[in-house]
Amino acid sequence: MFSHEPIEWPDKVEALVDRLENESAERSLTREERALMDVYETVAVLEEEDGLHGFWQSDVNHQRVINSFELIGAATLVDPLNASRWCQTRPEDRLDYSETEEEYLSTIEEELFEGMDELLDLVLDFMEEELG
């Protein structure tokens, strides 16, 4: 559906995410660790066929996820996430959107995926600065 190339997380990110997933069963993650997990998990949802609609229909804590993107420095992704909040109140199936709604959402998603181009670098910088 989208022309965006999926993010390929480096081994360094994958290893940290795996470690945090295992540790989260034994302890509460710090806010910074939780932010990294939120971003990592949300990217997979956003890259699925339903994009932003799928994100807003999921049962994640949407505001925490948006705050997590902001915490890691991905402000260019926060605006499209907020601009698509109306998807929360829409039908469960994206195919039920009107043509106008679908065009508007597609425009927001283009902005989102343009911002995702810098996400990998932001995550790596965040890991280095905040998670050592």
Image: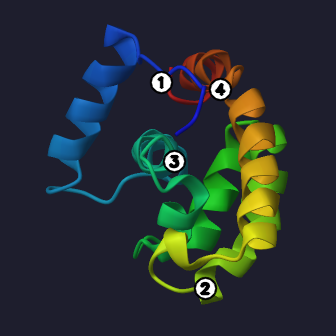
Q: Does 122 appear above or below 54?
A: above
Q: Does 91 appear above or below 74?
A: below
Q: CA distance from mark 1 to mark 3?
A: 10 Å
Q: Give the residue number, with chain letter if any, for mark 4.
A: 119
Of the two numbered discs 4 and 2 in the rendering, the one whose residue sits closer to the viewer: 2
Of the two numbered discs 4 and 1 in the rendering, the one whose residue sits closer to the viewer: 1
Residue kind at label 4, given as amino acid type? Leu
Q: Quadrant of residue 53?
A: bottom right
Of the two numbered discs 2 and 1 in the rendering, the one whose residue sits closer to the viewer: 2
* Residue at disc 2, secondary structure: loop
Q: Residues within 10 Å of mark 3 (few under 14, many from 20)?
A: some
Residue kind at label 3, given as amino acid type? Leu
Residue kind at label 2, given as amino acid type? Arg
Picture disc at residue 90: 2
**Could you tell whether 109 is left or right of 4 in the image?**
right
| Residue appearing at x 48%, y 24% in the figure | 6
Between 6 and 34, the one lying in front of the other is 6
* Residue at disc 1, secondary structure: loop
| Residue appearing at x 81%, y 70% in the figure | 100
Mark before the other along the chain sequence, 2 or 1: 1
Picture disc at residue 46: 3
Q: CA distance from mark 2 to mark 1?
A: 26 Å
What count of labels does the image hold? 4
Residue kind at label 1, given as amino acid type? Pro
Q: CA distance from mark 4 to mark 1?
A: 11 Å
Of the two numbered discs 2 and 3 in the rendering, the one whose residue sits closer to the viewer: 2
